[in-house]
């Protein structure tokens, strides 16, 4: 854990952050089907507080589905999902809304509000959802813009920003809700190649300087190696191999992992 984590250390109205290392996310026996297609098949996995866990695996293996389940954008057919000791599924609507606040997500497509400035994109949800005062939300938004290297772009509209800059605003917007966990789904896949490094540097910095838990889907293997405490290799809705990045990337046990890595590296 770092010593300079001003953004995550403030008292949080939503929750008592768990002690570092305790279980923050738990999926038990989670099954998700789309028609005849069983995408996740009795999946078990957990993520401990403060850890950075990366999901890798071929396209269609169910990685995005896991993140969408955690965002409650879709529901499992079977199983339970627990976040910070509270059930997210199954759970009554009110509890879902509470638990959902602990989770922030950044998507491949940044989806900023096009008619709002960068600053307003970041302050909107804290003001309307968390009931934060406009002044406090703006002060925090400026700190977050600074964190993502866009202190001078507060008044810019999305159309005036590059894709990489828009994605950095989207990261700041997710952090503005003070989530305990940040979900990142291939956040650089839609970017022009020259813009990828800047976004990854911002995420490396967040990983290093905050104690936010990260669950990340990426094809950027160097980035995954740098930031991950644990890498999970997915295939056909199951974790077929998991471990420290040095092990997964240097000495994978499964043929399937070796094949995947040789295709993407
Ligand atoms: N809304 C949906 N309707 C039908 N099938 C879906 C839907 N979302 C995902 N799938 C299917 O679920 C499988 C896993 O998809 P996804 O989780 O997006 O994989 P990944 O992110 O690993 O590429 C794929 O076979 C995909 O076609
Ligand atoms: Mg995906």
Image (spheres, helix red, strand yellow):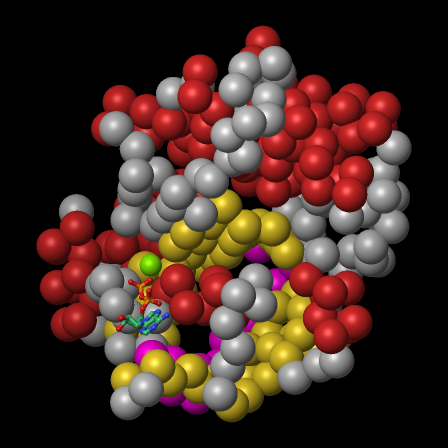
Q: Residue at x 64, y 40 (%)?
A: 175
> Looking at the image, is 215 positioned above or below residue 113?
below
Answer left or right for 259 relative to 202.
left
Q: Residue 43, image x and y in percent? A: 44, 82
Front-most of 193 and 120?
A: 120
Query: Residue 167 appears in which quarter of the rendering?
Result: top left
> In the rendered picture of this protein, how many numbered marks are placed on residues?
0
Q: Report the residue at 38% width, 21% height from top.
A: 162
Q: Residue 169 or 82: which is nearer the viewer?
A: 169
Residue 210 vs 130, above or below: the answer is above
Q: Magenta stretch?
A: 39-52
Q: Is residue 52 left or right of residue 211?
A: left
Is 254 covered by the magenta stretch?
no
Q: Main secondary structure of the magenta part?
A: strand
**Residue with the most extreme front position:** 115
Residue 157 visible at all: yes
Q: Quadrant of residue 149?
A: top right
Which corner quadrant of the figure contains ligand 2? bottom left
Q: Residue at x 44, y 39 (%)?
A: 110
- Name above or below for residue 5 compared with residue 233: above
Residue 136 horizontal/vertical position (percent): 84, 28
Whether residue 247 is situated above or below residue 150 in the rendered picture: below
Image coordinates for residue 246, horizontal then vertical, percent: 34, 53
Regarding residue 144, the answer to whether it shows in the image is: no
Q: Position of residue 59 (x, y in %)?
A: 23, 62
């Amino acid at each position: 854990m770092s010593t300079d984590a001003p953004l995550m250390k403030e008292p949080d109205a939503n929750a008592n952050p768990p002690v570092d290392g305790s279980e923050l996310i738990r999926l038990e026996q989670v099954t998700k089907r789309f028609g005849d297609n069983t995408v996740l098949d009795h999946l078990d996995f957990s993520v401990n507080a403060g850890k950075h866990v990366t999901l890798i695996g071929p396209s269609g293996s169910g990685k995005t589905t896991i993140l969408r389940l955690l965002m409650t954008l879709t529901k499992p057919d079977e199983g339970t999902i627990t976040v910070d000791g509270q059930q997210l599924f199954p759970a009554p609507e009110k509890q879902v809304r509470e638990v959902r606040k602990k989770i922030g997500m950044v998507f491949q497509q940044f989806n900023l509000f096009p008619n709002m400035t960068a600053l307003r994109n970041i302050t909107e949800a804290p003001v309307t959802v968390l009931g934060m005062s406009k002044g406090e939300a703006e002060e925090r938004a400026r700190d977050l813009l600074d964190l993502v290297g866009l202190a001078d772009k507060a008044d810019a509209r999305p159309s005036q920003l590059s894709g990489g800059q828009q994605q950095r605003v989207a990261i700041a917007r997710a952090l503005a809700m003070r989530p305990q966990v940040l979900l990142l789904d291939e956040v650089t896949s839609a970017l022009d190649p020259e813009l990828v490094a800047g976004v990854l540097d911002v995420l490396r910095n967040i990983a290093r300087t905050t104690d936010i838990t990260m669950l990340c889907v990426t094809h950027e293997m160097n980035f995954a190696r740098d930031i991950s405490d644990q890498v999970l290799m997915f295939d056909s809705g199951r974790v077929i191999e998991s471990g420290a990045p040095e092990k997964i990337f240097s000495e994978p046990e499964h043929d399937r992992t070796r094949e995947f890595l040789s295709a993407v590296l």
